[in-house]
Image (spheres, rainbow, N blue to C red):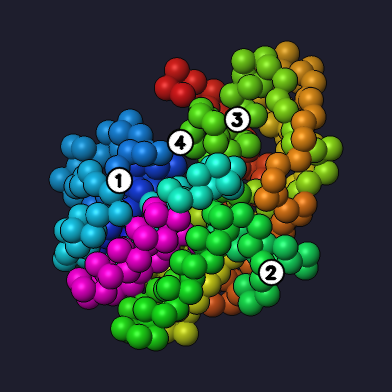
């Protein structure tokens, strides 16, 4: 699926911040398979060494253990790089509500450090993880890149500030940037554990333990759940595009379809029942709505299609099927 990118990426030096995390480790894996020379910068605050251990014997892989809040580390990591894929951040709306200061320090201060280091290293292109949370209280559906509302959480504020800084660094210093507004990404290596686990790996883990997952609210809230391979594709398209007009833009990174939480549970149960039939009988329970959550999210991917020729490779059903299989056969590692 990704082989078409090899000719343009072989031998390219690419820094992946947060490379030991869920999305970052998938990017490292694919980039190495395409012949890129990959440096991973991670402090393992939310990432895991076991995500990248398979790459340690690859001569094209290098790990720098460090924090993006340390400008000297950022300069060291960016030195000599052709591209930066900036994935490092503290995610989670609830985490940001509980601890807005640390979220801001990492997501804003760390982001600014990375922009400065990339600028000073004359990096060709700085591609970063933005967020669908930037749409805030805008009720318009589908979400289009140039129509946003007011942020509903400290996390959303930090991701919007990232976009403002990136635009400013292009206009002020000529650093080419691209922001990818990720929509509810899921897939292999996503951590199902911890207080801030995302909904899909959490539900999969609970079903596999024959536990009843708790849906926030009545289950009618909907999201544009996006499988990891769609996200990898978008990053590769941004790395390799030769369309100058595609640079210094923001793109939704999604499928362009929405699924309610109740529907999501049914899809997960359906695919898990392939391995354990009793899971299909597990009931779900309901809790309170979370602070900072928006009722519905649906992306338009028209801009990404027109500018980058992006076409999602996986629907929700296809992505859940692949994800469930991965968790089932890697359950001892989660």
Q: Earlier in the sequence, mark 2 or mark 1?
A: 1
CA gap between label 4 and label 3 equals: 12 Å
Question: In the rendered view, does 261 fall on the left or right side of 53?
Answer: right
Residue 202 badge: 3
Q: Earlier in the sequence, mark 1 or mark 3?
A: 1
SS class, disc 4: loop
- The x and y percentages for residue 49 are 30, 33
Q: Let me know if residue 83 is in the magenta part.
A: no
CA gap between label 2 and label 1 equals: 32 Å
Contact flag, marks 2 and 4 (Cβ < 8 Å): no
Tell me the mark number nearer the camera, choosing from 2 and 4. 2
Residue shown at 69%/31% (left/top)?
Answer: 268
SS class, disc 1: strand
Residue 68 versus residue 177 in the image, above or below? above
Residue 233 versus residue 102 in the image, above or below? below
Would you name the residue on which mark 2 appears? 149
- The x and y percentages for residue 237 are 44, 66
User: What's drawn in magenta, residue-wise?
Assistant: 104-130
- The x and y percentages for residue 209 are 62, 15
SS class, disc 3: helix
- The x and y percentages for residue 85 are 36, 60
Would you name the residue on which mark 1 appears? 42
């Amino acid at each position: 699926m990704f082989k078409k990118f090899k000719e343009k990426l072989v031998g390219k030096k690419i820094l992946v911040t947060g490379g030991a995390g869920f999305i970052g480790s998938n990017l490292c894996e694919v980039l190495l398979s395409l012949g890129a020379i990959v440096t991973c910068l991670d402090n393992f605050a939310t990432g895991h060494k076991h995500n990248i251990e398979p790459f340690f014997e690859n001569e094209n892989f290098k790990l720098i253990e460090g924090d993006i809040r340390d400008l000297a580390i950022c300069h060291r990591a960016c030195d000599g790089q052709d591209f930066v894929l900036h994935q490092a951040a503290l995610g989670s709306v609830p985490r940001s509500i509980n601890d807005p200061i640390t979220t801001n320090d990492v997501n804003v201060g760390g982001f600014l450090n990375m922009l400065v280091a990339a600028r000073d290293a004359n990096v060709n292109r700085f591609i970063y993880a933005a967020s669908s949370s930037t749409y805030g209280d805008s009720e318009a559906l589908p979400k289009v890149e140039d129509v946003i509302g007011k942020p509903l959480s400290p996390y959303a504020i930090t991701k919007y500030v990232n976009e403002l800084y990136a635009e400013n660094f292009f206009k002020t210093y000529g650093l080419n940037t691209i922001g990818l507004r990720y929509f509810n990404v899921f897939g292999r290596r996503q951590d199902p554990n911890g207080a801030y686990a995302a909904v899909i790996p959490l539900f999969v883990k609970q079903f596999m333990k024959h536990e009843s997952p708790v849906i926030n609210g009545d289950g009618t809230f909907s999201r544009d759940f996006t499988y990891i391979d769609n996200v990898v594709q978008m990053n590769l398209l941004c790395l390799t595009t030769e369309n100058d007009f595609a640079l210094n833009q923001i793109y939704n990174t999604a499928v362009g379809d929405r699924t309610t939480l109740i529907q999501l549970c049914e899809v997960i149960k359906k695919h898990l029942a392939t391995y354990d039939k009793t899971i299909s009988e597990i009931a779900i329970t309901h809790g309170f709505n979370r602070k900072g959550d928006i009722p519905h999210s649906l992306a338009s991917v028209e801009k990404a299609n027109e500018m980058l020729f992006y076409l999602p490779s996986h629907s929700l059903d296809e992505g859940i099927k692949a994800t469930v299989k991965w968790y089932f056969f890697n359950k001892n590692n989660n």
